[in-house]
Image (spheres, rainbow, N blue to C red):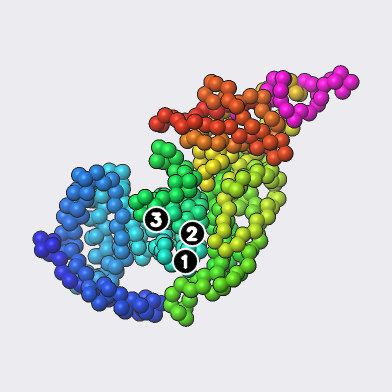
Amino acid sequence: MEHYDSTLKYPVLSPGILSNDPEMHADTLTIQGLGLVNPKKVFKFYNELHSYLAAAGIDGVKVDVQSILETLGAGLGGRVALTRAYHQALDESVALNFPDNGCIACMSLNTDALYCSKQTAVARASDDFYPRDPVTHTIHIAAVAYNSIFLGEFMVPDWDMFHSLHPAAEYHAAARAVGGCPVYVSDRPGMHNFNLLKKLVLPDGSVLRARLPGRPTRDCLFVDPTRDGKSLLKIWNMNIYTGVLGVFNCQGAAWSNLHKKNVFHDTTPNAISGSIHADDVHLLAEAAESDWNGDCAVYSHSGELVRLPKNAALPVKLKVMEHEVYTISPIKNLAAGVSFAPIGLIDMFNAGGAVSALVYEMQEESMEAKFSEYPQTLGMATMATENGGHLPAATIKMAIRGCGWFGAYSSMKPRKCLVETSPADFSYDSASGLLKLILQKPDEGQLWNVTIEV
């Protein structure tokens, strides 16, 4: 390390940090110090490290403990100058060696690091995922959601890695699905829950990532879902044609100002009841047609489909560490008694992320409308619940990513379904309106063209 002019430095911690976390007095870095590369030579350090990694096939890096720089600025122009020099060097090296901007900033929520990072787009929004510390899991979900209100305006909040084979794995996986964040795990080799990972990751390795940072709903902004004993945490996000809403019971544990650590404050918390509404998804109207009347199809990951009228509420009750994920899809009224809403790949947490394109084609004058002009005595019904023989009222065309069970809401049993140009078998539940058909594994880069006639 001599050619980097490194020196041994000891962090100088602020009174505020020490009063909030006295254990930092005994932290290894505080006691033993750390080697700090001369800021004038830090680009050389980063470039030599990153070029070596890139040559070995590595396509990105996660740069941890960035906030330590704010404690090392004495004699180097201060914390801001030191942080700026390091981030400029880091950004230049990442741009040179990882063209896809393959960098995750970690432990970097101090304002110096956030404002000096000009190139890095992804930043950790919380403390770590601690697999062996059960007190941390509910706090982790709540912390990221609330931190994303600020961080999500200029960074992609990172929810950290998790273990897919873990008692809290489903809880963490559902949060990543609504978080609009990278998805990655730190599983021990051979210790994987592939059934869970398949709810997040498609066979080609891509994820159905929501479009925005996941953030608390408006009615959660001024409550404490970790300790008030009555509030569920709701996190909303958007896809192109649907919204997604995660609901989590995060009660029972929180940071203790007395003990200066996370503790269980309620070891036997009760289940909590709440409700969800379509407008919990703040920008849902952006996914709807201009003539949308506010009605939605709401599909829970547990398998229930409900038609939710405008301003109506759907009850939800969860125990601690339980969750539910809802796909909320604006309903399109196509003709008298005929309406439709896409859901997506219903085995995935973020089902609606699979819907990449959606076009409604209405018949100018459907056969059903013609029937209504004739007297009932002719034996012609004015309303059908199954569209069997007459002309379609509308045709819905969609492009779908991935494979597995595709689901949609339809008020009427479809006349037929096509995948590409071939007729597709489908099932239809007239009680809920759930339409399902299977999509096979596509070729690389392929979207399935799904056509439904109703």
Q: Are marks 2 and 1 in contact (CB under 8 Å)?
A: yes
Task: Check disc 2 and report the residue beneath it.
Answer: 167
Whether residue 137 can be seen here: yes
Q: Amino acid at mark 2?
A: Pro
Query: Which span is picked out in magenta?
Result: 370-396
Residue shown at 54% from the left, 74% from the top: 265
Q: Earlier in the sequence, mark 2 or mark 1?
A: 1
Describe the element under mark 3 as helix, strand or loop: loop
Q: Is residue 434 above or below residue 53?
A: above
Q: Residue 325 at what x, y percent from top left? A: 57, 50
Between 59 and 241, the one nearer to me in the picture: 59
Q: Residue 252 at what x, y percent from top left? A: 55, 69
Task: Check disc 1 and report the residue beneath it.
Answer: 134
Q: Amino acid at mark 3?
A: Met
Describe the element under mark 1 as helix, strand or loop: helix
Q: Nearer the viewer, mark 3 or mark 1?
A: 1
Between 149 and 107, the one nearer to me in the picture: 107
Residue shown at 66% from the left, 33% from the top: 428
Density class for disc 1 (Cα within 10 Å; few <14, some 14-19, many ≥20) is some
Q: How far is mark 2 from mark 1, CA to CA?
A: 9 Å
Q: Amino acid at mark 1?
A: Pro
